[in-house]
Image (cartoon, grey):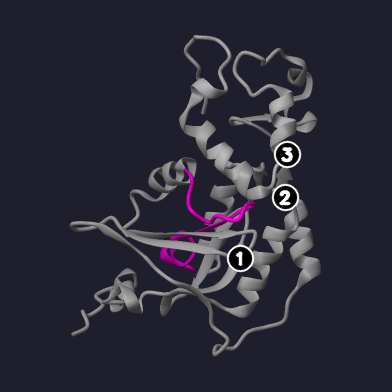
Amino acid sequence: MKKKASNQNSKLLEYERPRQSVLRFSPTAWAKFVFFRDCGETEISGFGISDPDDLLYVTDFQTIKQDATIASISLDDQSIADFFDAQVDAGRKPEQFFRLWLHSHPGDSPTPSSTDEATFARVFGKSDWAVMCVVAQEGKTYARLRFNVGPGGEVLIPVCVDYSMPFGPSEKEAWKAEYKANIKTCTWSHGLVYDDDILGDAKDADNSDYCLPQDIIDQLEEMEPAEREAVLDELAVRSDLWSSEEEEVFYD
């Protein structure tokens, strides 16, 4: 027996059994997501815009300004605020644009990293529900629906493209412009960004005590995507592998 939806947010409760909970993409939204994934060699991140009557149906994929590396994404705080305001001005409610976190992995594995898990918990931990979806370079997908209300809980859900729904054409030129405006490719060094436009004179500072040596970064960039992802996951949880001195290491 279906539970009666008492408000807009509770429409998600109509998906009573895990087998009925499927993260569905319109062909156009999926094409845009994959287009962004394949534009470069870094991760990319964005938000799914969902149908007000079907909150697990993604009708659009939208990005905001971010620093992207082969292993991480750093979203611009002001851009998040601007995105939120723009969506509200467009008449959407948060459950339509700030519940589906979509991002890519350059490697073959879509399994969330420890950093992904920390971001998901920090950013969406206070939402009544949220989905983390990862698409790997080779097409494998991962999606997890988490409920943070009542007793809470989470379940893995399938990902599919729904060709039965109406959809529009691709807009590659507009997508290219959005990618160029929002995705800033940076060198990865355990959360530090080395980019002339961001650091200016600070790029010449001696960071040898708390970042990966350049030779290791070069080796990472030469690895196959799956091998690189495995190494980066190990580095994320074992600072002793990259800290050359026995000292307390601080990082974001």
Q: Residue at x 31, y 73 (%)?
A: 18
Tag 1 and tag 3, C-beta contact below 8 Å: no
- Point out residue 142 in the picture as x, y percentages from the top left corner: 48, 61
- Point out residue 105 in the picture as x, y percentages from the top left corner: 60, 53
Q: Residue furthest top?
A: 246
- Point out residue 158 in the picture as x, y percentages from the top left corner: 44, 71
The span from disc 1 to disc 2 (Cα, nearest Å) is 14 Å
Chain part drawn in magenta:
92-113
- Residue type pointed to by label 2: Glu
Residue 141 lies, with reference to residue 85, above or below; the image says below
* Residue assigned mark 2: 41
* Residue assigned mark 3: 221
Q: Is residue 75 visible?
A: no
Q: Which mark is residue 147?
A: none
Label 1 vs label 2, nearer the camera:
1
The span from disc 1 to disc 3 (Cα, nearest Å) is 21 Å
Tag 2 and tag 3, C-beta contact below 8 Å: no
The answer to which of 120 and 217 lies nearer the viewer is 217
* Residue assigned mark 1: 139
Q: Specify whether residue 171 is painted magenta.
A: no
